[in-house]
Amino acid sequence: MSLIVQKFGGSSVADAESIKRVAKRIVESRKAGNDVIVVVSAMGDTTDELFDLASQVVPVPSGRELDMLLTAGERISMALLAMSIKSLGVDARSYTGSQAGMVTDAQHGAARIVEVSPRRVKEALDDGAVAIVAGFQGFNRGTGDITTLGRGGSDTTAVALAAALGAETCEIYTDVDGVFTADPRLVKFARKVNIVTCEEMLELAAAGAKVLDVRAVEYARRHGVTIHVRSSFNNNTGTLVVNPKDGESVEEAIITGVASDLSEAKITVVGVPDVPGKAAQIFTIVASANANIDMIVQNVSLASTGRTDISFTLKKSDAEDVLRALTFQQEEVGFESLQHDDQIGKLSVVGGGMRTNAGVSARLFTALFEAGINMEMISTSEIRISVVTRADTVAEAVRVVHTAFGLDGDEDAVVHGGTGR
Amino acid sequence: MSLIVQKFGGSSVADAESIKRVAKRIVESRKAGNDVIVVVSAMGDTTDELFDLASQVVPVPSGRELDMLLTAGERISMALLAMSIKSLGVDARSYTGSQAGMVTDAQHGAARIVEVSPRRVKEALDDGAVAIVAGFQGFNRGTGDITTLGRGGSDTTAVALAAALGAETCEIYTDVDGVFTADPRLVKFARKVNIVTCEEMLELAAAGAKVLDVRAVEYARRHGVTIHVRSSFNNNTGTLVVNPKDGESVEEAIITGVASDLSEAKITVVGVPDVPGKAAQIFTIVASANANIDMIVQNVSLASTGRTDISFTLKKSDAEDVLRALTFQQEEVGFESLQHDDQIGKLSVVGGGMRTNAGVSARLFTALFEAGINMEMISTSEIRISVVTRADTVAEAVRVVHTAFGLDGDEDAVVHGGTGR
C-alpha cells in the first residue's frame, strides 16, 4: 500500500461537475489500494473574486484579514470535494491548513512553511479515509493567526505534505498533459517532456513556464520529493520532475524546453557616473521598493563622458514603484534620466545537457538572427540562456528556436487552455 | 468603559457598501469609549448559495463537511468588516468560532454551545481592538471539528459572548426598528414595542415572529442577558428584551403582540382506537421521524365507534417524513386514515399581562367571529393563545385582532422588508 499526494488546481474543481469528476478519480486511486491525500485549491476564479470584494471595501486590505478572507476559498472546494467522495462510498475528511498542521512564519500573503505536523491527516489515513487538505493556507504558532502562502501556494502545500509523510509521489493535476518543450499555445509541435530534473524545472518556472510553482519545485528539490505533473482530464502519464541522487544519472537533453515570458518590463538608468558603488546604490534603492530584479545589463562606459547605462528587467507591476523611488533619489545617484519599456519579451532555453555541450548559445543566436529577431539583452546561468526581444516577436522567436534545437514533435500538441493554480 | 456586543445579520452586510456603513457605526461605538465585540453573519444570501452548491454535488451532504462549507460564509464577511474598520483608523481583528472559543457539542448543523472560552477575544479588547467574531459557528473539543449552530445561530453566538464576558447589553442589529406588535407588512398600524420580557419574546418567536432566534432568547433568559433589538439603518432606540429579577416588575401589556405563522401544516390521524397508549404510540412514531410538533388536539371520541381523531401541526417540511412513518406503522397503531392539510395559518396573541387579566380569549374569539374567520384548532400557554385558521384568512385575522386589543398606533409602521438572520 503506497501513499500518494494528489493536488488539484482551481480549474480542475471549477464547478459542481468538475468536482464530481475529480472525486471519481480520487476514489479510483483509493480503490486501487493507495492511501490518498488530496490537496485542493479554491474553485475557479474564487480567489480573484474575493480579492475584488476586498478592494471594493478598502484600497489596501490588512494582511491578516486578507488571509482570513482568501482562505474561505479552499474551505468551500475542499468541503464539496469531501462530500462528493463520501457520496461515492469512500470515507473522506477535509482539513484546513491549520487542522493539517501547516505551520508557517507570520508573513501574511507570502508565508513560508516552517513545520508540517499532519497528525490529523495521518489519523484520517489510518482510519481508511481520504484526507482532503486546503492548499495555499497555514497558520502561525506565535500569533495563532491564519496565513497564506501566496499565489501558486497549493503546489507547495502538496509537496510539503508529500515530504512530511514520505509519499511515493506528489501528483500535481492540471489542465495540460504535463511540462512541454514550449507553450503549446505558441508552438504547434511542442512535445510533452517525460522527465525533467528539479534544477531544470526551476529554471523553466523562473523563465515563465507556469505549470508548476517555483517554490514547490524548490521544496521538492530540498526534500527529495518526486513530482508527477499530469492532466486531470485523462489518464496519460505526464511529466516526472525528479531529483537524481549523487552518482545517479538522468540522461538530460541538451535543451529540455523553451520558455517565454511577457510579464516583465525593462528600466534603463541612463548616464550613471562610472565610479565604484553606483550599481550598489541603484539596486539598494530598487530593493527598498520591494521589487525583484530579473536580468541586469551594464553597458561599457564611454571614456568620453565617464558615464554608463544600467538596464534591468522586473515585473511590470513593480515598475512604477521603482521608477518613483529612483526619481526621488536622482540627485544623490547622479544619473541623467530613466527609460521605461514595457513592450519587451523574454525567451529562455533550458537544459541540463547544456553543461556538457558547447555551441548552444551560437545555435540560439543564429536561429534568432536568421529569423530577423533582434536581441536586446542576454543573460545566462549554468543550464539556461535568456534573451530579451521586442514583445511582439517572442512568439515567433519561440517557434524558430524550438525548431532549431530539434524539439518539434510529430503531432499537434493538445491544448486545454489556461493553467491551474 | 462598558462592554457592548453588537450583532449584524446578513442583510446588514449584504455588499461592500453595507459593510462600510456597518464599519462606521462600529467605529462610532468604539470612539464613544466602549469595548466592542461584533458578531457577524454571512453576507446576504451566501449561506443559501453555499447550500445550493452542496446540493449540486450531492443530494444529502455529510454534516461535518456541510459545516466546513457553510462556515466559509462568515469568514468572508468578518474579514471584510475587520478590514473596513481598520481602514477607519480603529484596530480590529476577526476570529472564527473556534478562535473565539465557542465550544459546542458534536451535533453538526444544530450544535449547542457547551462552553465559551473567549481568551483571544479578551486579548483583542485589552489591546484596544474591536473583536469581530463569526456568528453561527463553533467547534467540538472531542473531534476537533468545526460545527454550526443552525439557522439563526448568529444571535445565539452574540448572546453567549455577552453572557461569557458580562457585557452590558447585547445589541442585535436588523433591518427593522425592533419588535413590533404585529408584522408591519401585514398590519399598517403596527407599533414598535419598547420593552418585552424574555418570556414574552420566547412565545412571540415560537409563534412566528422572526426578528430574534428562539434559542438566543432562551440563552439570554438563562444567563440574564439584556438584548437590544434595533435597526442598523438609524440610531433609534429599538426594543429591549429584559429579564425582570425576582421582585422587580416590568409593567406588562395585556397583549404585547400578535404573531402569525404560515410555515406549518396539519396532519390528522383519523379513526384512532380510543384505548390508552395510542397517543403515546403515535407521537413516538412522529418523534422517530425527527419532527417537532407544535399544537396537538384530540377530539372527544365517538361512543358509537370507540374511535377518535388526533390532529397536530408541524413544519411543512417535516410533514412528508411523518406521513411516511405513520403509514408504515398503520396496522400496528390501528388508525383508519391520514389527512394532510398544508393550507393552514396560525395566529397567536402573546402578553405577560394575560396572567392577571380575564377575558382575553373571549375578546380574541369575538374579534375573529365578527370578521367571519373560522378557528380550526386552539392552544394556550400561560401567556399565549394560538388559533389555527385557513392560510388565506391569517392576514385579515392579525389585523382585526390587533385592532381589537387596542394595539394600533397613530402612524404607519416603517418597513424595510425582510429580516436578518
Image: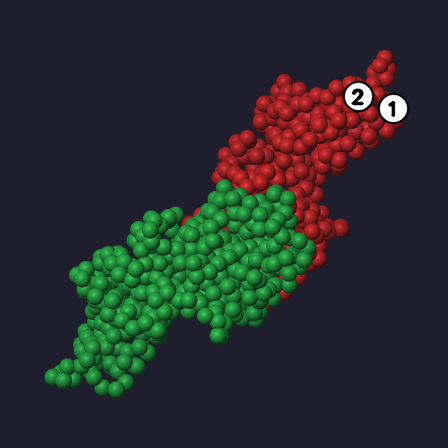
Chain colours: A red, B green
Q: Is residue A396 left or right of residue B421?
A: right
| Residue shown at the point (61%, 43%) measured from the top left | B88
Look at the image and tell me whether residue B270 can be seen. yes
Is the C terminus of chain A in the top left, top right, bottom left or bottom right quadrant?
Answer: top right
Q: Residue at x 23, y 77 (%)?
A: B298
Q: Position of residue B400 (x, y in %)?
A: 25, 58
Secondary structure beneath label 2: loop
Check the residue under mark 1 and report the chain it is in.
A
Q: CA distance from mark 1 to mark 2?
A: 12 Å
Whether residue B202 is visible here, answered yes or no, is: no
Give the residue at mark 1.
Answer: A275
Q: Nearer the viewer, residue B202 or B359?
A: B359
Looking at this view, name the residue that lies furthest to the top.
A304
Crowding at mark 1 (Cα within 10 Å: few <14, some 14-19, many 20+)? few
Task: Please tell me which residue is depicted at 59% across the width and 55% down the height of the picture.
Answer: B36
Left or right: A8, with B396 as reference point = right
Q: Nearer the viewer, mark 1 or mark 2?
A: 2
Q: Amino acid at mark 2?
A: Phe
Which is nearer the eye, A244 or B215? B215
Q: Residue visible at 70% across and 21% down?
A: A339
Q: Which residue is mark 2?
A: A335
Q: Position of residue A282 (x, y in %)?
A: 79, 29
Quadrant of the drawing holding the N terminus of chain A: bottom right
Tag 2 subunit:
A
Q: Which residue is nearer to you in this view: A218 or A15?
A: A15
Quick check: B261 above or below B105?
Answer: above
Q: Position of residue B38 (x, y in %)?
A: 55, 55
First-in-chain label (1 vs 2): 1
Three-letter code for the amino acid on which mark 1 is drawn: Val
Judging depth in this view, the residue of A57 and B317 nearest the camera is: A57
